[in-house]
Amino acid sequence: MNEFRRRVAVWSGTIGSLLFLAVFVAEDVFSPDYNWLSTAVSEHSRTPHGWIQIATFIVVGLLFVIFSRGIVEELRNVPGSRTGALMIGITGVFPILSGPFVTDPGGVVMGSSDATWHGAVHGIVGAIAFTLMPLSCFVSYRRLRSQRACSSFARWSLTVCFITIFGIALLKLAQLGVMRGLLGLFQRLLLVAYFSWIFALALRLHAIRPDSVLQRTQTMATSNT
C-alpha cells in the first residue's frame, strides 16, 4: 500500500466516525416528535427519511473496513496489531449488514408476534457489533501499551473499553424494562464513546509514522536483550 492509499485508509476512520455521530445527532435534533432519550438511534430508519440512516450505516461500515486496513499498514511493526484492526473491520461489516434490515419499534420483543424477520436480523447483527466494540478497545490497549509513543492512547483505550461495557450493561437493563425511558441515552453513551475512540485512533495514526514505531520497537527489543 503506497503512501496515498495508506493515508486515505486512515482518513476513513476520521470521516466515518464523525459522519456517524453527526448524522444521528442531526436527526435527533431535527426529527419532530422524536424522543432520543428513550429511542434507539436505528429507529430513525423507520421515519419518512429513514433512507438517510440506512445509507449512513452502509457508508460508515465501508469506511471502517477501509480504516482497518490503514491500521494494519500504520502499525504493521507492532506485534499483534492485526487483531485489533480485524475487530474494527468486522465491526464495520455489521452496520453494512444491519442497515438495510429496518429495526422493529422500541418495546417489540424478538420472537414475539409483533416482531419481524428484518427486525430480528437487525437486532442480532447489532448485538454482535456492540460486543466487538469493547473487545476491539481492549485488544488495542494490550497491543499498544508497550509502545512509548502510544502508551497514553493505550490507557484511553482501556477507559473506553470500560465505558462501553458499562453502557452495554445499562442498555440491556433498559431493554429488559429497567429504566426503559433512558434506553436511547444509554445507547448514545456507548456509541459516542466508541466512535470518539475511533476518531482519536485515526488522529493518532496520522501523527505517527511506521518507521518511528519500528525504531522504537527495535530499541525496546535491544534494551531487553
Image (cartoon, rainbow, N blue to C red):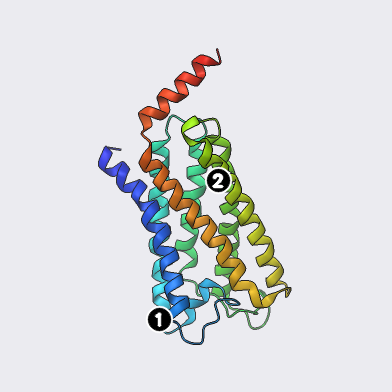
Total numbered badges shown on the rendered structure: 2
Q: Quadrant of residue 127?
A: bottom right
> In the rendering, at what x and y percent does residue 89 appear?
46, 50
Instruction: Kindly report the distance in space between the C-alpha atoms of the residues bearing marks 2 and 1.
Output: 36 Å
- Relative to residue 187, is residue 150 drawn left or right? left
Residue shown at 42% from the left, 85% from the top: 48
- The kind of residue on which mark 1 rests is His
Task: Pinpoint residue 80: horizontal percent, then vertical percent.
Answer: 52, 34
Quadrant that contains the C terminus: top right
Say whether marks 2 and 1 touch (CB < 8 Å).
no
- Residue furthest to the top: 225
Q: Quadrant of residue 114?
A: bottom right
* Picture coordinates of residue 135, whole percent (x, y): 59, 48
The residue beneath circle 2 is 156
Disc 1 target residue: 49
Q: Which residue is depicted at the point 71% across and 68% down?
A: 173
The answer to which image quadrant residue 58 occupies is: bottom left
Q: Is residue 109 left or right of residue 204?
A: right
Q: Is residue 201 left or right of residue 106?
A: left
Look at the numbered disc 1 and give the secondary structure of its residue: loop
**Percent position of residue 177, x then y:** 72, 75
The front one of 148 and 19 is 148
Can you tell which mark lies on residue 134?
none
Question: Between tags 2 and 1, which lies in front?
Answer: 2
Residue name at image x 68 percent, y 76 percent: 180
Q: Nearer the viewer, residue 122 or 132?
A: 132
Q: Secondary structure at mark 2?
A: helix
Residue type at mark 2?
A: Trp
Q: Residues within 10 Å of mark 2 (few under 14, many from 20)?
A: some
- Does 9 appear above or below 82? below
